[in-house]
Image (spheres, rainbow, N blue to C red):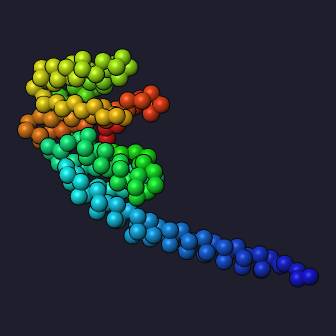
């Protein structure tokens, strides 16, 4: 029987660490060249999407065009990501260009949307959002999907924009996504 010395154990440990490093590096190259880069190129062809970044933990960051259709762009990004990554992204962050008025209005609208979702009064919710936006001299678009309510607020001809995406289902956590 062969006796294992400290020297052998150290050599085995060094070989293990080097092998692990090579495998992690290969995984990173594979994810970048075979998965993320083609996914980013596909997503950048979605109408209304200007720039996309896919970060760690399958986080997707978007920059939308000034007059993009939020619901169509968001749903297309989710579908492309799910097809490429095998699951929906853990987080989709949409770049915002707000001013003080849009930020304040968005905070107020979160309650209106949450109440509309909780009560199922989507028509009243939409009318309340449009009325509040009109009083603030802001253009608002409200879209209702099967899983989310999408609200786009814009001011000064689209120079300032803020996007709200709120999940409809209670199991989705009820949070608001706006980055």
Left of 157 or right of it: where is 54?
Answer: right
| Residue 129 versus residue 165 in the image, above or below | above
Q: Image quarter for residue 176?
A: top left
Residue situated furthest bottom in the rendering: 2
Residue 99 seen in the figure: no
Q: Position of residue 29 (x, y in %)?
A: 44, 71
- The answer to which of 14 and 118 lies nearer the viewer is 118
Q: Residue at x 37, y 35 (%)?
A: 147
Q: Position of residue 145 (x, y in %)?
A: 30, 34
Residue 91 seen in the figure: yes
Q: Position of residue 17 (x, y in %)?
A: 63, 72
Q: Image quarter for residue 5?
A: bottom right
Indicate the quadrant containing the N terminus: top left, top right, bottom left or bottom right: bottom right
Q: Residue at x 12, y 23 (%)?
A: 134
| Residue 65 versus residue 170 in the image, above or below | below
Residue situated furthest left in the rendering: 157
Left of 129 or right of it: where is 137?
Answer: left
Left of 71 or right of it: where is 118?
Answer: right
Q: Residue at x 36, y 45 (%)?
A: 92
Q: Residue at x 29, y 56 (%)?
A: 43
| Residue 61 versus residue 7 in the image, above or below | above
- The answer to which of 149 and 2 lies nearer the viewer is 149
| Residue 20 versus residue 75 in the image, above or below | below
Indicate the quadrant containing the C terminus: top left, top right, bottom left or bottom right: top left
């Amino acid at each position: 029987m062969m006796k294992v010395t400290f020297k052998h154990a150290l050599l085995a440990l060094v070989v293990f660490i080097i092998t692990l490093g090579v495998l992690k590096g290969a995984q990173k190259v594979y994810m970048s060249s075979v998965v993320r880069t083609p996914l980013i190129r596909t997503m950048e062809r979605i109408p209304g999407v200007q720039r996309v970044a896919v970060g760690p933990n399958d986080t997707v960051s978007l920059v939308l065009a000034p007059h993009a259709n939020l619901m169509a762009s968001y749903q297309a990004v989710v579908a492309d990501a799910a097809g490429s990554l095998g699951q929906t992204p853990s987080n989709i962050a949409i770049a915002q260009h707000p001013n003080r008025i849009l930020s304040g209005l968005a905070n107020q609208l979160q309650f209106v949307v949450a109440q509309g979702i909780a009560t199922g009064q989507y028509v009243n919710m939409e009318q309340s959002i449009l009325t509040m936006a009109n009083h603030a001299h802001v253009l608002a678009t409200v879209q209702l999907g099967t899983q989310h309510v999408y609200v786009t607020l814009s001011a000064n001809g689209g120079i300032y924009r803020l996007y709200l995406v709120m999940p409809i289902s209670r199991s989705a956590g009820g949070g608001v996504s706006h980055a």
